[in-house]
Amino acid sequence: RGLMVDSAAALVRIAGGRVGVLQLAGQPDALRELLTGARALGESLVVANLPAGHPASAILEALGGNLDGRQHELELRFS
């Protein structure tokens, strides 16, 4: 299912009361509105592969949501 507000959009999957955000983009204020609406669609909210430092991280935490892993395969580490 696609969700959209003024300057944010998300692709979500709703299954068994769990709202899983698969893709997410937008401005912080719009992300708050979008994630609040997504949270209302189920019993729990989970975001997959949210990059570290993404504006949605604090919003997700405030809504009681969870982060389901981070994507690291494109990360280059120096030792």
Image (cartoon, rainbow, N blue to C red):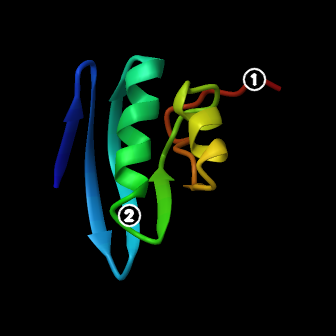
Residue 62 lies in what quarter of the image?
top right
Q: Residue at x 58, y 36 (%)?
A: 59
Circle 2 — which element? strand
User: Which of 32 and 79 lies nearest the eye of the viewer?
Assistant: 32
Q: Position of residue 37 (x, y in %)?
A: 35, 47
Q: What crowding class fits label 2: few (fewer than 14 Cα within 10 Å), some (14-19), or many (20 or more)? A: many
Q: What crowding class fits label 1: few (fewer than 14 Cα within 10 Å), some (14-19), or many (20 or more)? A: few
Q: Which mark is residue 19?
A: 2
Q: Earlier in the sequence, mark 2 or mark 1?
A: 2
35 horizontally vs 41: left or right: right
Looking at the picture, does residue 23 appear above or below residue 53?
below
Amino acid type at mark 2 = Val
Q: Residue at x 39, y 33 (%)?
A: 33
Q: Residue at x 46, y 72 (%)?
A: 43
Looking at the picture, does residue 53 appear above or below residue 69?
above
Tell whether label 1 touches label 2 (CB within 8 Å): no
Circle 1 — which element? loop
Residue 61 lies in what quarter of the image?
top right
Amino acid type at mark 1 = Phe
Which residue carries the number 1 mark?
78
**Which quadrant does the C terminus fall into?**
top right
Measured Cα–Cα span from mark 2 to mark 1: 36 Å
Q: Residue at x 28, y 54 (%)?
A: 12
**Which quadrant does the N terminus fall into?**
bottom left
Q: Position of residue 13 (x, y in %)?
A: 27, 63
User: Which of 10 and 50 lies nearest the eye of the viewer?
Assistant: 10
Question: In the image, which is nearer the foreground, mark 2 or mark 1?
Answer: 2
**Quick one: which residue is furthest to the right in this view?**
79
Q: Which mark is residue 39?
A: none
User: Which of 22 and 65 lies nearest the eye of the viewer?
Assistant: 65
